[in-house]
Amino acid sequence: MSETATGPVILLVEDEPQMRRFLRAALSSHAYRLVEAGTGQEAIALATSHNPEVVLLDLGLPDFDGLEVTRRLREFTKVPILVLSARGREDDKVAALDAGADDYVTKPFGTNELLARLRVALRHAQGERKAEPVFELGPLRIDYARREVTKAGTMVKLTPIEYRLLACLAKNVGRVLTHRQILKEVWGPTHGDDTHYLRVYMAQLRRKLEDDPSNPLYLLTEPGVGYRLKD
Amino acid sequence: MTDEGDSRPDPDALLARLKAEERQRARLKIFFGFAPGVGKTFAMLESARLLKARGLDVVVGLIETHGRAETAKLIEGLEVLPRQTLDYRGKALEEFDLERALARKPAILLVDELAHTNVPGSRHTRRWQDVLELLDAGIEVHTTLNVQHVESLNDVVAQITHVQVRETVPDSLLERADEIELVDIPPEELLKRLSEGKVYLPEQARRAAEHFFRRGNLLALRELALRRTAERVDEDVVAYRKQHEIQTTWPSGERIAVCVGPAPASARLVRAARRMAAGLRAPWLAIWVDNPVTALSKADHERLESHLELVGSLGGEVVRLSGTRVAETILEWARASNITRIILGKPTHSRLRDRLRGSLLDDIVRGSGDIDVFVISGDPDAPAEPVDRSAQPRPVAWRNYLASAISMGVVTTIDVVLHRSLGLPDPEMLFLLAIMIVAATLGRGPAFLASGLAVAAFDFFFVPPYLTFAVADTRFVLTFVMMFGVGALISTLASRLRDQELEARQREQQTHTLFAFTRALSEADTLDALARTTARHCAEAIGLQAQVVVALSRNGSLQPCGAWPTNSKLEPNDLGVAEWVFDHGRAAGKGTDTLSGANAYCLPLGRSQGVIALLRAEEPTLEERALLDSFARQAAVSVERFQLAEDARAAALRARTEELRSSLLSAVSHDLRTPLAVVTGSATALRDDGSLDASTRAQLLDTICDEAERLERLVRNLLDMTRVQAGALTVKREWVPLEELIGSARSRLSRQLAGRAVHVSLPDNVPLVSVDPVLFEQVLLNLFENALKYTPPGSPIDVLARVMPDVIELEVADRGPGFDPADAERLFEKFYRGAHLGTSGAGLGLAVCRGIVEAHGGRITAQLREGGGARFVITLPVVGTPPPVPPEEGT
């Protein structure tokens, strides 16, 4: 742990020494304080003793898998969990997210991307957006009180589902949401598997909000996982 | 066969010698005697002790001491295999234990009494079969044999001694023997030993023995044994001379043919032919002429087959001919095959029949020209020779006789009516017509009945005095005789015609069955399908309740591959029989001499290609065996064809795998090392060289990032390719808008695509496609990357989709330099890279695309674009319809 740093405490759960060395260097230089664990067991112990503000969790651990660590952490803490995972393991990511992880970063990743995800996670944990009556992102503006959406000052007419979908993404801006999470939130708990509903409404929403719906700038697809409203 | 001497080494002889050396077959030594009691067992044991003393592994498999102390003493000091005890009808019987002998596998095994018949329940019926199996297993066997048990001498011995010996050993076994040691004592000595009680004889044989052990008999038998051994010595000399290319002249250029039929005397003919051939050292053949007009009865057929089998066991060759004129057929064939002697049986039927039907013997003698004809007497004890096979009528149902009587009644009524009303002048003509019809439809017996009834009816109704059987005018008696005679002749002719037709139909049926089988075989596209086809056709040819399992050799072991009916299975017991057949290349199981206790009759399929097993309650008849045999031969050809093709395929695959491996290695070594070299170089420069200015440092850092990205892409493609290749690609289809797939690929490549104009033109109703979104995004990503790599910076990329009723077409097109049209297919091959300078990559991107698209049941092609550039077109079949999305309330 860096002596001088005063930033948020990160619990880094990763068994590869090289990755740890790189992450230590990248994160310490941005004033994060690090607590490091090499196994899932250690991670649980350190999470109780050090009360970290965010957990950076590698899914492939020697003792039990990251999914199990996520579940155990969620038994006693709401600390944001950021999962590190390789490409091609979309199912693992979805499972981790559905088990309570907040977001994921695909290896290999750039430092900028990691830092941005960390910031989003910390911000959501502090709940700073929740109280805001108005959401603004680029040319988009959502007035929660009036249930009105404008794009570059022009009113956009949305159906109730489209509005709920947009609002759901906006509340989690910058964070990935799995299909299941969105479906439950917008359509209700019985529609958890009807992903084609979601895809069709998402396409409609893009046509109304994006300049080029085949090259979206805000309503991004996370293949095999879900959607994310770009920060 | 080679009959002429030749100054050059005969290639066949060389081949035979090579084969003999190659096999390194186990030796067989026979201690040969002319009667029981000459001391064969004794001689065998003495020689065994000598061998043992020389340190050879000699084991006693089975020796009958018959309680004689001298013999028992000789066994002492030799290892003796325990016998097996078999339960036969409640009695425990001891028998030679073949299994144990095979398991023990000594260098030399002693097995007494080669001609012995095994206790039922043993693996083989005869001990000589056990010996053959031992030899096959590479065990040298020493055994004993008496002259009267030699098959070809069997009837001669019977003639001399008037004792018929049933237990015979095929001559081929004597020929197989590497050494025959004659154990000889003067008959006087033997008789003395007999009187001293030193010769053991079983109780029941005592009476026969009184006949047997007469001095005259013994002398004759001794001469036979000596002669047989001398013949054998001659053969050894010939073999030696042949082996050393010493020019030999055959004592004769003879070729002997013996005419064989179903008559019991034929067996004698065969043995006589064998003896004559051995004496002349000439090749011999047996001919059977199948007359398609006449059918053999079942008993005749079985006898014929046993005669032909005898020919095989005596080392002759069987020739089956077919023809209606037997004598002509035989002579024609004999001339064509340079036959010098023909052996025929003496006719046993009356001269009258020859006058009526012509005599085979006469025809052959007259037509033989310079071929010598030998006529040999039949066995006097044999039943009369049923030469005229049509004389054994097919069993005719009593219904046919009834039908014949009824139809004659009807005809009589019609005849009477016609005669009375129209004054028909010749009522007998109508009767003759009716007899002919009866003969043609109902057979000969009913036709004879019809003839008799016709005469009776004619007498009763048309010969005065009417309505009595009395005849006023005696001239009518002549009419009756003529009428019956004509009727009988007509019926004979008509029924023969009918038989011919039946026969021809049956033959055609068989030919058709075989033809259908051959055709079905050619349609089979896998070995399993072939096995199934074979099983099915065999079962259908055999008929009801036949179950057939075909097992084929797979990687050296026998595996059931096809069965008909498909649920037929081989019990472990039957599988054991199948394996035995597979190992030994001989038929076995139910109805044979080997492992006859099994439920299955198994016959080999080709040379160690497989086994056909027939499961049925009844034993297979000889005809059925012959049929199965022809099926097996046909199937073997196809199996061999498959195995060859499979070998060729495997070889091609190995070569291709090897080629792939080397290109993978070169690609990986090049494509992984280049970026690694750049990263290492740049990173060390940054670390070690303090003098770099800010812009150089920035440049180096960019290089590191770019190269790392390139590495990532390469590894990703390699992993994807591995998954495609390993068949580990599971397509999880979801209904996805095409737009979303395109969008997600574009956002992942947003940095690289910056500065490129990407035009997406989709139909208005954004089509939903049923694809795996993750995999399909990868396809688009690779196509974009491909375009980025091979087209000049800034050139546009177009994405188009067309929706058609059955397919959806998605196209990624560029304005690059295009490609050589000849390469259109190769572009999608692994490790293939377009011939452009300055491009990097392992040549995997498009191969991955194809793998994924094909896993979706689609196609991907590369085409040249009008106006320059390349088009990559994906054609996806429309799978089902997307589920409906319920309309929103209140919109």
Image: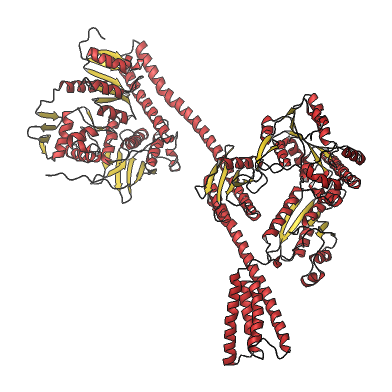
Q: Is residue B260 left or right of residue B634?
A: right
Please, is residue A170 above or below residue B280 in the view?
above
Q: Is residue B378 left or right of residue A148?
A: right
Name the colouring of the figure. secondary structure
Q: How many marks?
A: 0
Q: Is residue B118 left or right of residue A75?
A: right
Q: Is residue A218 visible?
A: yes
The quadrant of the image that shows the C terminus of chain B is top left
Q: Is residue B526 visible?
A: no
Pick the residue in front: B869 or B231: B231
Residue B529 position, x and y percent, is 52, 47
Q: Of all residues shown, which one is farthest toward the top?
A: A3
Residue B140 position, x and y percent, is 75, 33
Please, is residue B416 above or below residue A131 in the view?
below
Pick the residue in front: A131 or B344: B344
Q: Of all residues shown, which one is farthest toward the left?
A: A146
Please, is residue B298 above or below residue A19 in the view?
below
Q: Quadrant of residue A8?
A: top left
Q: Residue at x 67, y 32 (%)?
A: B100
Residue A133 position, x and y percent, is 9, 28
Q: Quadrant of residue B335?
A: bottom right
Residue A116 position, x and y percent, is 23, 22
